[in-house]
Image (cartoon, helix red, strand yellow):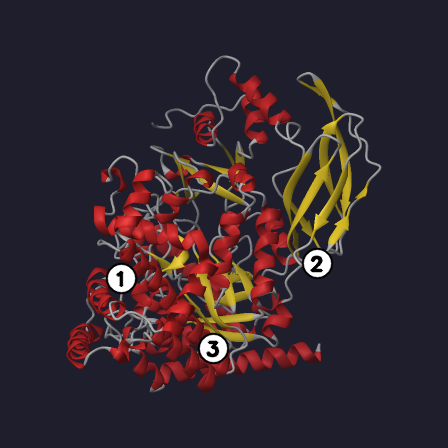
Amino acid sequence: MSTGDFVAVGEGLANLAAAHGVAIEYWDQARSHVGVSATTVEAVLAALGVDLTGDDAIERGLEDARLSNWRRMLPPVFIGRQGEQRRLWVHVTHGQSVRVHVDLENGERVVLEQLDWYVEPIALGDRFVGEASFAVPPDLPIGWHSATASTVDEVATMPLVMTPERLDAVALTGERQWGFMTQLYATRSRSSWGLGDLADCEALAAWSGNELGAGFLLINPLHAASPRPPMTPSPYLPVTRRFTNPIYLHVENVGEFEELAPPVRERLVQLAQTMQRRNGTDEYLDRDAVWAAKRVALESIFSLGLSCERSAEFAEYRAFEGQGLRDFATWCAISDTLGSEADNWPSGFERPGTEEVAEFCAAHAELIDFHCWLQWQMDQQLARTQLAAKAAGMAIGLLQDLAVGVHPEGADAWSMQEVLVRGVSVGAPPDMYNQVGQDWSQPPWHPAALAEATFVPYRDMLRTVLRHAGGLRIDHVLGLFRLWLVPAGMPANAGTFVKLDHDAMLGILCLEAQRAGALVVGEDLGTVEGWVQEVLADRGIVGTSILWFEADSPGNAKPPSEWRHEVLASVSVHDLPPTAGFLRDEHVRIRADLGLLTRPVEDERAASARERESWAKLLIDDGFMPPDVDLTTDAGMEGFVIALHRAVAASPARLIGVALPDVFGDRRAQNQPGTDQEYPNWRVPMTDSAGAVVVLEDLFAKPELMVRLVGAVRREQRNSERLGLML
């Protein structure tokens, strides 16, 4: 399929699109109006299950949309919010009396009061259907409750989810906090098996908390990848977002490691030493090699079995994660046995629950147990990491990251087909990251199907990710409001936005975060309308400020004093080169080399120079950088990096992030958005300004740049806090 010539959207199609939350126009990042082609709108509607065949398709579709709620007694799920009375509709035969009660999680029952709220009845088949209204009180306790409506001849039940009014960031963070931000796989120590792991995460959290007073450590998503090679490098394209990648396990910290027979343990020690030699090379990170070695070790440990006490702990974990864990482990076992290409699997393996899959499970029970065991080990090491972070005085501790979506052939796509859309993929419209748009190949949530599933797949994912986190960063938080969907076969810039029920998505997120005692940070960058940031702030979700994006409409640097307060602020982000590289136009070079620019490279370099000059002027005027600095020298550029971090720390931002590569002077980007194999995304080891590989022990030795940069951040943070108290 191709977009062909632009086809305008007619009135009927526009109305049908609106009924399903499909946009026919939008405003891009530059606030320019963009119309969407009818070709795109029709393709997206078809993917959502709207039948567009026949001359009367639009008329039929509009009628189905109009009657969909009238055909049911209760909605599939009701989302309440504390501090706000909301109306619950109930559809019954016109004139019948109806009662509604709510059974709370704690076993208590609350009878709802009917409202004097008239809605005109409609004819539906051979009966008239009326709409009764009930008040859901604002003081119901938070939780997943059950509401029941009953008449003389009809009863219906649905989940009633009461969500908190807002998260209290102050209660969760206390004073303003700063912390490192790092890609864990690239954050290696001398004891790593060629890739950073949870022991490295624990060591960095404990050291930065104890020695530097850090309040959090933000890491990349730990979501699972395929257990078979090749393992997708991107942590933002996982096979599931609910479960984790056991490549991050520190083998020696697995509980039963010390129980290995001496000859076996010695072989694993030798294997570890072989892998540890990789930590000193500047070669690209090799996940397949690391996982192959770790799997040998982990299989050896698993074969030992468990004590009675440990077996009970394992059983408790499996019960907590339930069918979701079993489905994921089953998918892993099938991939192990039949290969990761689902198109090559025999008939009957298309989805869980078939007779063929049941027979496979019976024949491969031990392999499924192994994959469940790996997740249990990850759960235990994550718990240990968070405990160490809190023990080091961190107010938040581990700040985990949630990706936008999942791999189209992964475990979630296999086990959750009912709530994901096929025929389209998630991406982003053209913006400053990628001027031709992005297609991330991920199947999106189906808004209507997710509601029919009462949002349980979403809730269960959040519960697992939040279990051992002090906070959660939501990558592309706009995805809780609307998603940019690209029809199969079309270019990334030919997509459109589709709305989600953001009230439900945010409410459930806040509910699960509050129960976990976790802060939520939303990455609200890119093509984001202003009201979205207002809604996020109203729910207590911390936003994101990146220094390079803090500019006024002409492009001049915005003084840090004018930045938002409830944000995580930093100089850079993982989709840009480290600061030392950005200042040297590394982002321009990469996009030019890969053909990702829509204007001449000379214009891009000139725009980048103007941006640097604008920031240099502000930094000098505000006293963050001396006026005689020579930005043509490495020393001058290093001073520029420190001054930029001083500016961020002087802002009113609640959270201040320092990218770990910046404290070494690293220059290479971890990721170039919109590329796959064109750039070594997510495989670049951390290096210093000279390109030499660095490990955590180099950080713990307190190199001069780290001391100067972190010291400057902490001083500006304290000065800003004192100024805030004076004001």
The kind of secondary structure element at disc 2 is loop
Q: Amino acid at mark 2?
A: Pro
The kind of secondary structure element at disc 3 is helix
User: Horizontal and vertical percent for residue 145?
Assistant: 65, 51
Q: Amino acid at mark 1?
A: Arg
Question: Residue pushed farthest front?
Answer: 308
Residue under pointer 3: 387
Answer few, some or many: residues within 10 Å of disc 3's Cα (few below 14, many 20 plus, some between 14 and 19): some
Q: Does residue 667 show up?
A: no
Question: Residue at 48% across / 68% down in the picture?
Answer: 468
Q: Are marks 3 and 1 in contact (CB under 8 Å)?
A: no
Left or right placement of residue 395 versus residue 441 in this view: right
User: Horizontal and vertical percent for residue 606?
Assistant: 38, 55
**Quadrant of residue 375 in the image?**
bottom left
First in sequence, mark 1 or 2: give its number: 2
Task: Report the front residue among 89 and 625.
Answer: 89
> Could you tell me how far apart the alpha carbons at marks 3 and 1 are, in whole angstroms?
29 Å
User: Horizontal and vertical percent for residue 17?
Assistant: 54, 29
> Could you tell me how far apart the alpha carbons at marks 2 and 3 are, in whole angstroms?
29 Å
The kind of secondary structure element at disc 1 is loop
Residue under pointer 2: 141
Disc sitting over residue 447 in the figure: none
Residue under pointer 1: 683
Q: Amino acid at mark 3?
A: Leu
Question: Residue pushed farthest right?
Answer: 116
Question: Residue at 40% across / 55% down in the picture?
Answer: 325
Answer few, some or many: residues within 10 Å of disc 1's Cα (few below 14, many 20 plus, some between 14 and 19): many
